[in-house]
Image (cartoon, helix red, strand yellow):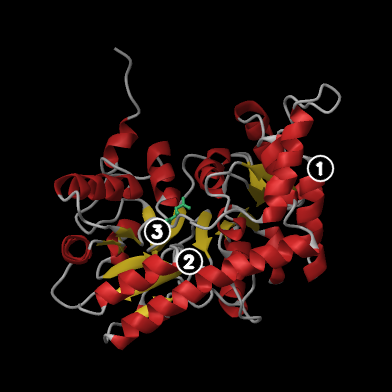
C-alpha cells in the first residue's frame, strides 16, 4: 500500500468549519423543528451586484459564439481584470502596483494555503493567534511543524498572541522567523492593524529578511480612513510583503470564486547558496503548472465592480452587512456582553460569559437558542474564551437571532 503524508494526522480530524457543519447537521437531524440561524461560517447571503450579473450574462453569451468563445485563459488571469485591479485598488490610492504584479485566482483560501509551497520546508513561520486556520493547517500538512502540544500549539511554530490586552495587535517575536502571516481586518477578531503596527512588522521583516504574508481579504470593510486597506500604504512594504485580496466578501463571490495575490516585482527569496530569486517568478511557475486560471465568465463578473456603478453597488452590499454588525454589537452590549470587532470588519468577537469554554458556549447557543457561532479556540489557543459571530446573515434573521440572545 502507498504510504500517506503523515503530517495530515497531526491535524484535528475535521477542518474547523466542516466540524461545525457536522455538529449543526446532527443537531438539526435530532431536532427537525428547530429553526437554526447560522452566524457561524462567514458566508454571504445577499445576491451578486447587478453589474456582475450583467457582465457574466454577456460573457456566457460570448462563450456560445464561435467568434468570441474562449478556452484556457492565461494562468495569471486576464489582463482586463489585472489592469482594473491595478488602477482601482492601487494606483487611484497612490500605490504603484502594476498589472503584472497581480495574479488572479479562484479565491484567497487557495492562495493563502498554496503560497507556502514556494518557500523552503525549513522556513520558520510566525502566525497570529487567533487567526484564519488555513495558514497553520497548510504548514502542518507540508511538514513545517512538529506535533500538537497540550497547550494547543504546534511544535516549531512561533505564535503571535492577539488578545484584548494588546488590542489584538501582535508584536514581533524575539526570535527570527522567515514567514509571517498577518491578517487585517483580522478573521476572527474583526480588529485591524494600523500603519504604526504594520511599520513595526515591516522593519522586523527588513531586519530579518522575512516575508510578510498579508491577508487583506476583508479590506473593503474598512471605513476608518486611518486604517490601511493595503499593506503597501506603509513605507517599505513592497520590499517584504505579499498581499492577498478577494472578491468573496467584497462583492459576494464566495460561491462564484475569485481572488488575487500581489507579489511585487522586486520581492526576492534566497536559495540555500544565497542566490536571490524573484518570488513572483516562482509563483507564476507554480500557477502555470498547477492551475489553469479562473473562469473567463467569473473574471468578467469581477471586472464589473470597477466602474462607478459597480462601486456604488458593492458599497451598498458592504453597508448592509455592516449595519448587521452594528445590530449585533448593540444587542450584545444591551445584554451586558463584551464584544470586539464589527466596526471595520464583518466579524464580532464575543467574550464568553465566565464558566463556559468556547465549545461549551457553542453547544449552549445551539441547544438553547438554535444559533450557530464559531468557537474562538478553533482559530487558535488564544481564541479560547471567545466566540465569533458573523454579520453576513440576512437582516430578518439577524434581528431574530438577537431577539433570542436577548434572553441569554
Ligand atoms: C470564515 O468563516 O472564516 C470564512 O468564510 C472562511 C473562508 O473565507 O474561507
Please indicate whether residue 13 sits to the left or right of residue 86 in the image: left
- For the residue pair 58 and 149, the one nearer the viewer reads as 58
**What residue did someone put label 1 on?**
79
**What residue did someone put label 3 on?**
158
Count of number-bearing discs: 3
Q: Which mark is residue 317?
A: none
| Residue at image point 68% right, 64% down | 313
Q: CA separation, marks 1 and 3?
A: 38 Å
**What residue did someone put label 2 on?**
186
Q: CA separation, marks 3 and 2?
A: 18 Å
Please indicate whether residue 221 sits to the left or right of residue 37 in the image: right
Q: Report the mark closest to the observer, 1 or 2.
A: 1
Q: CA separation, marks 1 and 2?
A: 30 Å
Instruction: Determine which quarter of the picture holds residue 146.
Output: top left
> What is the crowding at mark 3: few (fewer than 14 residues within 10 Å), some, or many (at least 20)?
many
In the rendered structure, are the residues bearing label 1 and label 3 in contact, judged by CB atoms less than 8 Å apart?
Answer: no
Q: Position of residue 359 (x, y in %)?
A: 20, 60
Instruction: Determine which quarter of the picture holds residue 128.
Output: bottom left
Amino acid at each position: 500500500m502507498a504510504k500517506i503524508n503523515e503530517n495530515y494526522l497531526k491535524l484535528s480530524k475535521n477542518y474547523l468549519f466542516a466540524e461545525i457543519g457536522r455538529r449543526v447537521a446532527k443537531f438539526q437531524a435530532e431536532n427537525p423543528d428547530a429553526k437554526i440561524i447560522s452566524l457561524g461560517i462567514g458566508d454571504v447571503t445577499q445576491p451578486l451586484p447587478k453589474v456582475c450579473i450583467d457582465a457574466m450574462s454577456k460573457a456566457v453569451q460570448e462563450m456560445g459564439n464561435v467568434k468570441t468563445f474562449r478556452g484556457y485563459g492565461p494562468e495569471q488571469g486576464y489582463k482586463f481584470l489585472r489592469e482594473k485591479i491595478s488602477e482601482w485598488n492601487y494606483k487611484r490610492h497612490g500605490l504603484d502596483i502594476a498589472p503584472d504584479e497581480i495574479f488572479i485566482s479562484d479565491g484567497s483560501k487557495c492562495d493563502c494555503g498554496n503560497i507556502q509551497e514556494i518557500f523552503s520546508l525549513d522556513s520558520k513561520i510566525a502566525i497570529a493567534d487567533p487567526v484564519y486556520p488555513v495558514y497553520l493547517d497548510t504548514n502542518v500538512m507540508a511538514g513545517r511543524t512538529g506535533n500538537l502540544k497540550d497547550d494547543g500549539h504546534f511544535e516549531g511554530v512561533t505564535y503571535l498572541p492577539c488578545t484584548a490586552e494588546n488590542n489584538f495587535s501582535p508584536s514581533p517575536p524575539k526570535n527570527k522567523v522567515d514567514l509571517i502571516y498577518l491578517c487585517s481586518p483580522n478573521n476572527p477578531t474583526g480588529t485591524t492593524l494600523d500603519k504604526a503596527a504594520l511599520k513595526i512588522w515591516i522593519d522586523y521583516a527588513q531586519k530579518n529578511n522575512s516575508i510578510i504574508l498579508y491577508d487583506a481579504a476583508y479590506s473593503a470593510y474598512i471605513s476608518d480612513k486611518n486604517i490601511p486597506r493595503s499593506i503597501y500604504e506603509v513605507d517599505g512594504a513592497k520590499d517584504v510583503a505579499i498581499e492577498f485580496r478577494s472578491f468573496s466578501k467584497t462583492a459576494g463571490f464566495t460561491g462564484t470564486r475569485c481572488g488575487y495575490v500581489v507579489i511585487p516585482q522586486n520581492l526576492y527569496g534566497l536559495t540555500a547558496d544565497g542566490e536571490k530569486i524573484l518570488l513572483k517568478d516562482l509563483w507564476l511557475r507554480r500557477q502555470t503548472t498547477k492551475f489553469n486560471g479562473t473562469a473567463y465568465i467569473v473574471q468578467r463578473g469581477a471586472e464589473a465592480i470597477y466602474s462607478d456603478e459597480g462601486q456604488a453597488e458593492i458599497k451598498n452590499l458592504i453597508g448592509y452587512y455592516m449595519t448587521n454588525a452594528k445590530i449585533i454589537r448593540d444587542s450584545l452590549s444591551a445584554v451586558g456582553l463584551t464584544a470586539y470587532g464589527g466596526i471595520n470588519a464583518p466579524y464580532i468577537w464575543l467574550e464568553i460569559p465566565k464558566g463556559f469554554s468556547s465549545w461549551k458556549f457553542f453547544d449552549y447557543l445551539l441547544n438553547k437558542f438554535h444559533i450557530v457561532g464559531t468557537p474562538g479556540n478553533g482559530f487558535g489557543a488564544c481564541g479560547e474564551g471567545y466566540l465569533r459571530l458573523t454579520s453576513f446573515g440576512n437582516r430578518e434573521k439577524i434581528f431574530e437571532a438577537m431577539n433570542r440572545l436577548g434572553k441569554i
